[in-house]
Amino acid sequence: MRRLTLIRLLFCVIISQAQVRIISYNVENLFHPAHDTLKNDLDYTPQGLHHYSYTNYHTKLTNISRVIAALGENKTAIVALMEVENSQCLDDLLSIGGLKNLNYKYLHHESPDLRGIDCALLYNTQLVRVLDCRFLPVVLPPPHRPTREIIYAKTLIKQHSSSFNKADTVHIFVCHLPSQLNGPQATAEKQSIALRVLQSKIDSIIRCNADANIVAMGDMNMQPREALQNMHNLMTDSTFLHLGTHRYNGRWTCLDQFFISTALLDKVKAHIYSPDYLLEDDRKYPGKKPKRCFNGLMFENAYSDHLPIFLDFQTHSN
């Protein structure tokens, strides 16, 4: 019990000392209950397979809002989200709970993903100024299904003073790489294409500025590895060797990852957010697992099948 108390105390200290934070969170099928005739989303409607009601939807929004707010409210500059159906979900998310009175806006684009699950980027207008935004298409050849785009944003993230300056420039990428369906060979091909798109844009930034601050994050749908040139995967650190963000068949894996450029190596530190309320007993295997929203066909008053990760800028005020 004393050890758990010390761990919680340490986490509170981490939260209180952080000046600027970036969060990445796969929120597991954040669908709006209304059917979108252009998307394969019928399972997540009141009449669909999951009987996904507006009450369920509001519960899910409230729970996601709780997690984001608990991770530092005004200290959080950017929240990268995966598996969001549309902008209505984002509007509703920012209108309830702990996010209601904060200064968040978002970047989102309807991707060609057949199910309609996209990436999104929330940003705190008090801490972030968006200079440029693009949605990078990941074009997969037949017979692969269309997949979501990669979000790129050139931002100023306020770190040292009360005003924005050029030194605060951070290039942000939000990714949700193709899933591991259809076997290892198909997965490797799809992910290789997505990584080439990401690498190409990173290379273009570094050609202009070798010391650029770059953060690429999201659900990479693969084991942590150094998959990008001139970038460092923070989740390959020994700190995360026996930890994870997703559990499948009793095994934890760090599918959610941060890649950073060399310029940020001594300036940031990554963490996995895993408080008790985001975990539950695994009914098939020993240990805990993320408290996911959909257990089979049933919606539960829970959160996501992924744990969020966050990145703190280790900066000091002038």
Image (tube, rainbow, N blue to C red):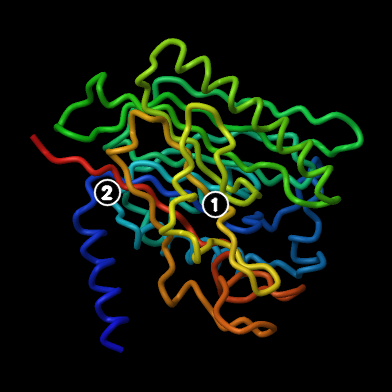
In the rendered image, residue 221, in percent from the top left (x then y), is placed at: 65, 49
Residue at the extreme front: 238
Residue at x-position 45% and y-position 20%:
132
Q: Quadrant of residue 98?
A: bottom left
Question: Is residue 154 shown left or right of residue 174?
Answer: left
Residue at x-position 22% and y-position 25%:
164
- Label 2: element kind: helix
In the rendered image, residue 213, in percent from the top left (x then y), is placed at: 37, 27
Q: Nearer the viewer, residue 23 or 91?
A: 23
How far is disc 1 from disc 2 in space, using C-alphas?
21 Å
Q: Which label number is shown at residue 256?
A: 1
> Could you tell me which quadrant the N terminus lies in?
bottom left
Question: Is residue 134 shown left or right of residue 102?
Answer: right
Viewer-nearest of discs 1 and 2: 1
Residue at x-position 81% and y-position 64%:
48
Residue at the extreme right: 143
- Label 1: element kind: strand
In the rendered image, residue 258, in percent from the top left (x then y), is placed at: 47, 44
Residue at x-position 37% and y-position 54%:
100
| Badge 1 density bin: few <14, some 14–19, many ≥20, Cα 10 Å | many
Q: Nearer the viewer, residue 65 or 316?
A: 316
Question: Is residue 306 shown left or right of residue 68?
Answer: right
Disc 2 marks a residue whose amino acid type is Lys
Q: Is residue 253 above or below residue 205?
A: below
In the rendered image, residue 283, in percent from the top left (x then y), is placed at: 66, 85
| Residue bearing the label numbered 2 | 75
